[in-house]
Amino acid sequence: MGMFSMMQISASALTAERQRAEITSANLANAETTHSDQGGPFVRKEVVFSATNGSLFHSALNEASGFSAQPPAGSVQLTDVVDDPTPSVERYDPGNPDADASGYVAYPAIDPVHEMVDLMGSVRAYQLNASAISAEKQMIQQSIGILKTS
Amino acid sequence: MSNVSLGAIPNSYMPDPSSLDAGSDNGGLNFGAVLKNAINSVDQVNANAGAQVSNVLAGGGGDMTGVMIAVEKADVSFQLMMQVRNKIVSAYQDIEKMQF
Amino acid sequence: MATYPSLDVLQGYLKVVTDRQQLIVSNMANVDTPGYHTKDVDFQSALRAVMNSDGEAHLDPAAMELQGLPERPDGNNVDIDHESLKLSQTQLEFQLGVQLVKNKFSDLLTAIKEV
């Protein structure tokens, strides 16, 4: 299996974590949004990661493909963005234009602390995989250094 | 030519020693055969390395370390062949200079 | 058989190290994937096999799951710090292998040219 496939695996993690950070930021930004396009309050989104299956070693497909578009086994992908089914929080505010008949306004069930922790987790994972890419790049450079012996 | 058998050099780099006995009238030493043998084995190592490099350049990106090692092996083989050639040529010239 | 490792053995060593690095990288990429379990190879026995068979062993070492790692609520048991440590370690092992290969070639070239 190739060194370049390793870089693809780490790169897939960078993409996935960045997407997760985007979703989390959107949740944070809309923590108080009472009116969205679909009517009703903003719905909190969650991400679903999944690992690409397959044998990590000597898969015939991987040997032949090199820089193919298909992600190598072991990489991670954002497969789905799902709505959080938690019901929205009701607050009493009759003066608000979005208030219903009884004067309650529905707010998204978003806890800023929870979202911040998620965001920090994304950042840490991103850094981890970025350092993995540096390590892989260094390994390839060292390999090339074999040719400089004479 | 028999002192080239250093333990460190794997047999695949060396010209076939049996070619030294490729009988001829100069007392058992056939310079041409030895040189030809050396060139052939270098050719083979070179072709193998070349194939692997082409594969990497075409996007195969497989066993990077293996390719590097193969290329360096080809280079070392070539150097060995050049030294063998130089020795043979210089030995031949020495013989030519002998006056009887 | 305590001679200096041949080029083939060194190549085998580098291959084992590279394979392990690949698993480590996969683990790091999947640190947030629910249900993902840390994978590793039986490094020691793979290395021993390479040393004993003079680099000919092309076992595809089975990627096994490590036992005894605590699982987080989402089923993921990848330990970031542990994997970082393994990454550094494998990097150094790779560097060692490459340096040994370079020395080997350098010795050969010296022997050839010093006639």
Image (spheres, rainbow, N blue to C red):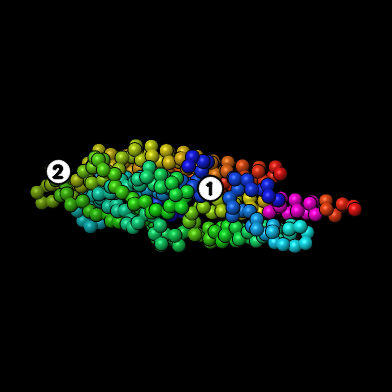
Image: magenta residue range: B81-93
Q: Is residue C69 visible?
A: yes
**Element at label 1:** helix
Of circles 1 and 2, the one toward us is: 1
* Residue type beneath disc 1: Leu
| Residue sitting at x 42%, y 59% | A62
- Mark 1 neighbour class, 10 Å CA radius: few under 14, some 14 to 19, many 20 or more: some
**Element at label 2:** strand
| Residue sitting at x 68%, y 50% | B2
Name the foreground residue: B30 vs C80.
B30
Q: Mark 1 to mark 2: distance in Å?
A: 74 Å
| Residue sitting at x 59%, y 54% | B12
Q: Which residue is mark 2?
A: A91
Q: Is residue A17 visible?
A: no
Name the foreground residue: C31 vs A63.
A63
Quarter occupied by residue A31: top left
Q: What is the x, y in percent for residue C6?
A: 52, 46
Identify the mark at residue C7; answer none if there is no mark: 1
Identify the mark at residue A122; answer none if there is no mark: none
